[in-house]
Image (tube, rainbow, N blue to C red):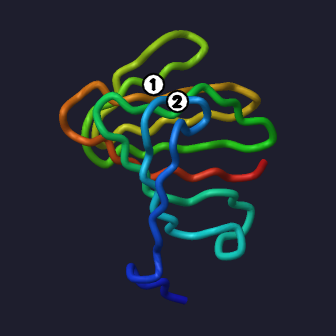
Amino acid sequence: MIKKASEMHSTIKSQMRGGSGQVVMKAIADEGTVKHCRLFSELRIEKGCSIGTHDHVNETEYYWITSGRGIVTEADGEKVVEAGDLVITGGGASHAIRNEEDEPLTFLALIILD
């Protein structure tokens, strides 16, 4: 199966998970396309925007940063992430991510059901 780029639609989420501003989400695949997966999307966060704190119970979320720099908040504090980094959140843990840089922060987000 091949899903063409023209079939991948973007949506804008305002105050995603209680965050600020807007997040652009391009759906790469949906629950019906990938087994045991709740989300597989490319996300873009502009300067001053964020995804608010949320937890992952019975699932694990992966953020693979593809461009830009962001700040991830986890239980043990804030960490800077940049292109090539992988953020892994599961087992009931929570996280948030924000962009304070001029360059957009983009990453692939994948949520796998445990």
Point 74% across, 62% down: residue: 36
> For this view, does 58 lie left or right of residue 87?
right
Q: Residue at x 50, y 59 (%)?
A: 41
Dot 1 surroundings within 10 Å: few (below 14), some, or many (20 or more)?
Answer: some
Seen in the picture, residue 107 relative to 54 is either above or below; the reply is below
Q: Which residue is mark 2?
A: 19
45 left or right, relative to 28? left
- Of helix, strand and loop, which one carries label 1? strand
Q: Identify the image quadrant of residue 6.
A: bottom left
Res 29 quadrant in image: bottom right
Q: Mark 2 Cα within 10 Å, few/some/many (few <14, many 20+)?
A: some
Image location of residue 70, percent across then percent down: 34, 29
3D distance between C-alphas at marks 2 and 1 = 12 Å
In the image, taking residue 17 as reference, residue 9 lies left or right, namely: left
- Whether residue 113 sits left or right of residue 69 in the image: it is right
**For numbered disc 2, what is the local secondary structure?**
loop
Q: Residue furthest bottom?
A: 1
Q: Nearer the viewer, residue 58 or 55?
A: 55
Percent of width and height locating residue 65: 36, 43
Which tag is nearer the camera, tag 2 or tag 1? Answer: 2
Which residue sits at x=68%, y=35%?
A: 90
Residue 71 x, y percent position in the rendering: 38, 24
> Which quarter shows the N terminus?
bottom right
For label 1, the residue is 72
State whether residue 96 is above or below residue 2.
Answer: above
